[in-house]
Amino acid sequence: MDFKKPTTVILYFEGVDNRFSMFPAMYEGGSSVVRPPPSIPAKSSRSWSDHPTPYFKTVISPDEERIHICPYFLNNFESIIDFKWSVTIVYRNNQEGLANWKHSKGTWNLIAGYVVAKIFGFKKPTTVYLDFQFKNNLFIMSHEKPKSIVNRVADKRSINVSSDSEDESDDEHSNESENDSDEDEDMDEVVDQDEDESDEADDMDQVNDESDEEDIFEFNVKVTQSLAYKKQVLHFPTKTSKFALLDNQKQIYLRDVDTMSLTDCTIITSTRSENEKYLGEGLYTFVRQKRLRPGDVLHCTVEDPPQYMNVNVIRAVRRR
């Protein structure tokens, strides 16, 4: 691996033959080693991650040259990416597509998206995950979220260098703290489920989809009479507001996956709860442009980072 500058890394012991797996370290907001790209809000607590996540979600379209790269991904892995050389994207059956880096407006993206889409047979904008392989600018492409590195190395055993009684007691205390933390997370999940149930009762008539209920970035909304013909707001699910959107986020672009056109929308936070957010100005323009009617379903996918929300309109069957 060819580091271009001094790089802090995480080493995981493989358990045999003195072998270690190496991954880039994630940095906290005050680090001087890696700067957040200009596209990341300076005060955003979501600009950094405590755990390596070498993949990101993006859209590859046969009608668009650019392939958007998550700036959070770039922030953590720019030290081992060679921006002078092209990127190899490997799909099923070992199909390969090449894309080049382009620096514009303070951030990096890939170009030749329409060429990649043609190679892989994409006839329309397709949401994919690109999983960085840590060498040779190689990415594995899939339609399902890859396992995070934390899960990939979950079976790796840690090694206690010292066997002093004090260290053992510290380990026991640490394990107790981790167990308490797990219990707290379980309680949070219960609270989130209760909040989701209350959200389902509102007029937006959000559609349940068991395959997506664990994905905070995707949700469906069924168009009602009020949304189609009146200026009704569109509420985000609680989990999406809490975990996918940025704190105090006030704007997002709606991307029509059919035409790739963008609509600038405001995000309004309810005075009742900071986790209750909805779309305001700009939504009505999108509704009119798409000529939405009651019964249509909006399949919404918030990108990470949440600068864009891809919206696919699924038309209801009309009776004749």
Image (spheres, rainbow, N blue to C red):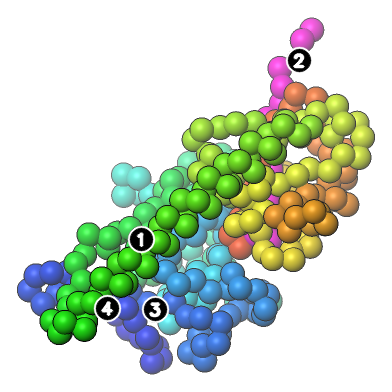
Residue type highlighted by circle 1: Asn
| Mark 1 neighbour density, 10 Å: few (under 14) some (14–19) many (20 or more) | few
- Residue 279 locus on image (x, y percent): 80, 50
The mark that comes first in sequence, 2 or 1, is 1
Identify the secondary structure beneath mark 2. loop
Q: Report the amino acid beneath label 4.
A: Asp
Under circle 4, the secondary element is helix
First in residue order: circle 2 vs circle 3 = 3
Q: In front: mark 1 or mark 3?
A: 1
Residue shown at 67% from the left, 80% from the top = 42
Q: Nearer the viewer, residue 58 or 235?
A: 235
With respect to residue 313, does 316 lie above or below? above
Q: Is residue 167 left or right of residue 90?
A: left
Q: CA distance from mark 2 to mark 4?
A: 66 Å
**Residue on which the image places disc 4:** 170
Q: Where, quadrant-wise, is the C terminus in this rendering?
A: top right
The residue most toward the right is 230
Image: 31 above or below 182: below
Residue type indicated by callout 3? Ala
Q: Which residue is mark 3?
A: 25
For the question of whether residue 130 can be seen, the reply is no
Give the Cα distance between marks 1 and 3. 25 Å
Q: Nearer the viewer, residue 98 or 308?
A: 308
Residue 42, above or below 197: below
Instruction: Give the residue at mark 1.
Output: 179
At label 2, the amino acid type is Arg
